Image: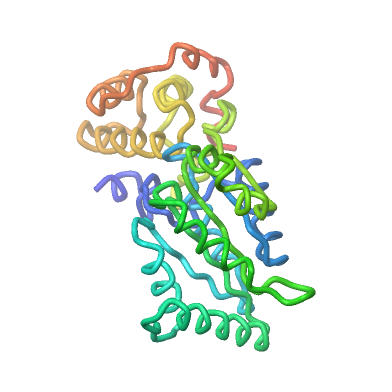
Amino acid sequence: MYQDFFELNEKAFGNTPDPKFLFPSRQHQEALARLEYVIEEKGMAMITGDIGTGKTTLSRALIDSMDERYKPILLLNPRFAPAQFLRMLAQKMDLTPKKLKSDLIDQIQDRLFSYYENNTIPVVIMDEAQLIPGKSFFDEIRLLTNFQLDHTNLISVILIGQPELAKRLQHHAYAALNQRITIRFHLRPLDEQDILEYLQFRWKVAGGSAERFPFNETSINKIYAYSGGVPRLINLLATTCLIDALSKGVAEISAAMVDQQADDIGLLPNPANIGKQHGRHGRSAQAR
């Protein structure tokens, strides 16, 4: 597709959570540093953010950063019963789950002690945690944090979800779990000054050259206006614009092309974002 036309090694603006494409903005670096601290201390963390702000990509970058001491246990889309959660956790720990819950819990606890004796730190990462169906499920998560020795915990737990996760856990019914969360971080959309660097970063990672970078000042301004700085929307707009540029045989993406693609997708510009970047992004900036 457009990769050959723009001399890229791969897609620059895909929406898969490839950790090498995690843009090192200040907030993403801070979030990653906090998560690395939590798993080192075998604590509990909660990362929230609106749809498309890079939560899942951040979790993959965390897994990529782990050395052989850690055993990441990634659980996606947790819309299942508490008993299913424990069984899945046991399977992720390379166990054959027992049928009775009491036996299953003992089985998991024994495995955690075995990990400790072998200097292994299990890290449970639960993505889309706002989908957890009920309090009883959260109670099982809290149970995991009860597995500890006098001087250390035996497991790290990271909850990742949309903002309603944090609101939900503020309810007094979840106080016991909420109090165990030592690190909290909320991912926000990118700032306006980050947009050019974000596009350039992903372009470079995909093997693109500065000379073939197709976005100019006005098209970047439009991308920010339509996306609001949400990385997933930036990627969507950038991809459709590159495809449009390929079909037209042009090397530069204009503001009009962004307008057309945004209209096709159904995105409306935020008036507060229009024109904020005027004067920030010239063609000379693209070669830096």
Q: In this view, does 23 lie above or below 275?
A: below
Residue, x 67% and y 62% (percent of image)?
43
Residue 173 in the image: x percent, y percent? 55, 46
* Rendered-image quadrant of the C terminus: top right
Residue, x 34% and y 56% (percent of image)?
79
- Horizontal side of 28 relative to 95 (left or right) equals right
Residue, x 54% and y 59% (percent of image)?
61
Residue 225 in the image: x percent, y percent? 44, 20
Q: In this view, does 70 lie above or below 79?
A: below
- When asked about the image quadrant of residue 185, the answer is top right
Residue 145 in the image: x percent, y percent? 62, 66
- Horizontal side of 162 relative to 115 (left or right) equals left
Snapshot colouring:
rainbow
Q: 259 or 98, which lies in front? A: 98
How many numbered badges does the structure rendering display? 0
Residue placed furthest toward the right: 151
Residue, x 67% and y 47% (percent of image)?
30
Q: 182 or 32, which lies in front? A: 182
Q: Is residue 48 above or below residue 205?
A: above
Residue 139 in the image: x percent, y percent? 52, 59
Residue 280 in view in this figure: yes
Q: 123 or 206, which lies in front? A: 123
- Horizontal side of 238 relative to 178 (left or right) equals left
Residue 199 in view in this figure: no
